[in-house]
Amino acid sequence: MFDFLSDYDDPSLLGAFWVTLQLTFFSAIGSLVWGTLLAAMRVSPVPLMRGFGTAYVNIVRNIPLTVIIVFTSLGLADIFGMTMGAPDDFEAQGFRLAILGLVGYTAAFVCEALRSGINTVPVGQAEAARALGLSFRQVLSLIVLPQAFRSVIGPLANVLIALTKNTTVAATIGVAEAALLMKEMIENEAQTLLIGAIFAFGFVVLTLPTGLILGWLSKRLAVKR
Amino acid sequence: MTSVLYDAPGPKAKRRNVIFSIVFFVLLALLGWWVWTVMDDKGQLEWALWEPFFTESEAWTTYLLPGLADTLKAAALAMIIALPLGAVFGIARMSDHRWVRIPAGAVVEFFRAIPVLLLMLFANEFFARSTDVSSAERPMYAVITGLVLYNASVLAEIVKAGILALPKGQTEAAKAIGLRKGQTMTSVLLPQAVTAMLPAIVSQLVVIVKDTALGGVMLGFTELLNARGTLAANYANVIPSFIVVAVIYIIVNFILTSFASWLEGRLRRSKRSTGAVLGAEDMEELNPAAVGGSFGTGGEGGGPGGFGGFTYPPKK
């Protein structure tokens, strides 16, 4: 029943899911960093940065991820010549471009989650910090963001789960991850239902534990008020 | 809110802010200049590539408008089919009978955990093998099937949240005048829940509109992104066509988002409602979103409302 799986070894089933995992991992780190920077810009005292952050979030959120990912390949790589440090290796290039697109898109949602988290920090906390003479940067990095992060683990976990599922869009530019392999298998093999079930199971395995673990963590780490 | 983090700027802070503004502006300008020169080098700025959008109606009538029509058609159909389905599953999840509640919960959780793209690919192949849907129609069917399966389960959560958000007195009053469970649900709770859910439902439309783009690349569904491909093949205007298509998406989704928040504000103010309103912000914790994501669609609020607890998967 499962013997057709051995016909696929580049990538194999596990290999494809490994690529999915890698995409998720690197995009998660990238979007966390970029999203935090965007959130800092959105609450900063400099009007120009605030404007940029707001514009970025509202524009990027309203464009389909598919458009962004396809653009990284047809626009950034072909027209702007961004080879991502791999001019000849198209596989690595596609992988990195997909991460770039995912980071650019997901960061907007990370930023919004963080900003909501900043709103949950009581005003008195920031006021007390300012009364001690801390600067904006210190207030943000020492007092507000640590509390905000702990209160947004839940929403960030949702972003991470969405990101895991969103990595399938990388298939549109030919990154050999789970969705692309499923497309190939499902077209060549007769066992549509079985293949669908295998890949569905793979994603359930990837997303359910993330939700459970981070859900538990968000309850444990929530700032008790 | 932002003013909590910093005082009204004094002379020194004002000076510093000006410096930051200038540095940031220079960085942005450098980026813009780089983009401009590259586009100039590659000839993407030539008027001939932009002209079709402004002077020739053909670019719109042959490519973009039919593409947009397909996008909106698929999104609207998916929504219309997913709504009643979502309502049924949402109510089933709250059933008193375990044999109804548990299967419904399993179905909803299952379809929320799977990427929409997989559902679409599967549906496409399923239609090809087991039905006689013509191959021209198949991508449309597949896209709508994928969207319906995913969004019905998201809507099921919205319906559930909408009913739970109603004041308890509503159920109690219905019981007091002797309504049965079914009657309570259909004539008291559901109508009010639907009103409360409207803003959340409208913002879910943004996710659906964005997800249709998947069908364009992977299944050959002739929606907006796909239309961009044919357009660019005809006029060789890669960057301009991307920009125009992105702007169309932004406008459509911005209209939906604004409508949702207008609706939310209106419902919150309305005296006749029970006061239960689910906005996009309230729903974000329930909505891990497929491709697209709808973590709060705009608005400056972003209050602490949606962060009571983590509910993925929701507590049974």
Image (tube, coloured by chain):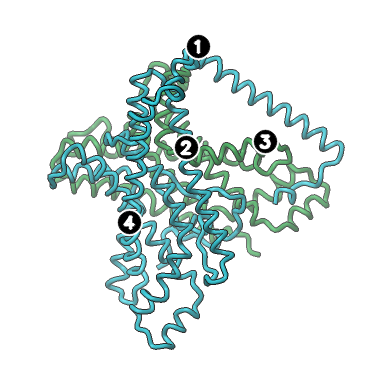
**Disc 3 versus disc 4: nearer the observer:** 4
**Disc 2 versus disc 3: nearer the observer:** 3
Q: What residue appears at the point 32 percent right and 42 percent down from the top-left corner?
A: B117
| Mark sitting on residue A49 | 3
Label 3 lies in what chain?
A: A
x, y (%) of residue B259? Answer: 51, 51
Q: Which amino acid does label 4 sit on?
A: Ala
Label 1 lies in what chain?
A: B
- Report how far apart the C-alphas of labels 2 and 3 lie in the structure: 24 Å
> Is A101 placed left or right of A46 in the picture?
left
Q: What element carries label 4?
A: helix
View extreme (right): residue? B11
> Is A69 placed left or right of A120 in the picture?
left
Discs 2 and 1 carry the same chain letter: no
x, y (%) of residue B160? Answer: 41, 66
The 10 Å Cα crowd at callout 3, few under 14, some 14 to 19, many 20 or more, is many
Q: Mark 4 = which residue? A: B82
Residues at marks 2 and 3 touching, judged by CB atoms closer than 8 Å = no
Query: Could you tell me if residue A204 is visible in this image?
Result: no
Q: Which amino acid does label 2 sit on?
A: Ser
Q: What residue appears at the point 44 percent right and 15 percent down from the top-left corner?
A: B48
Q: Which amino acid does label 3 sit on?
A: Met
Q: Mark 2 = which residue? A: A27
- Report how far apart the C-alphas of labels 2 and 1 lie in the structure: 31 Å
**Disc 4 versus disc 2: nearer the observer:** 4
Q: Chain B is drawn in which colour?
A: cyan
Q: What residue appears at the point 60 percent right and 52 percent down from the top-left corner?
A: A116
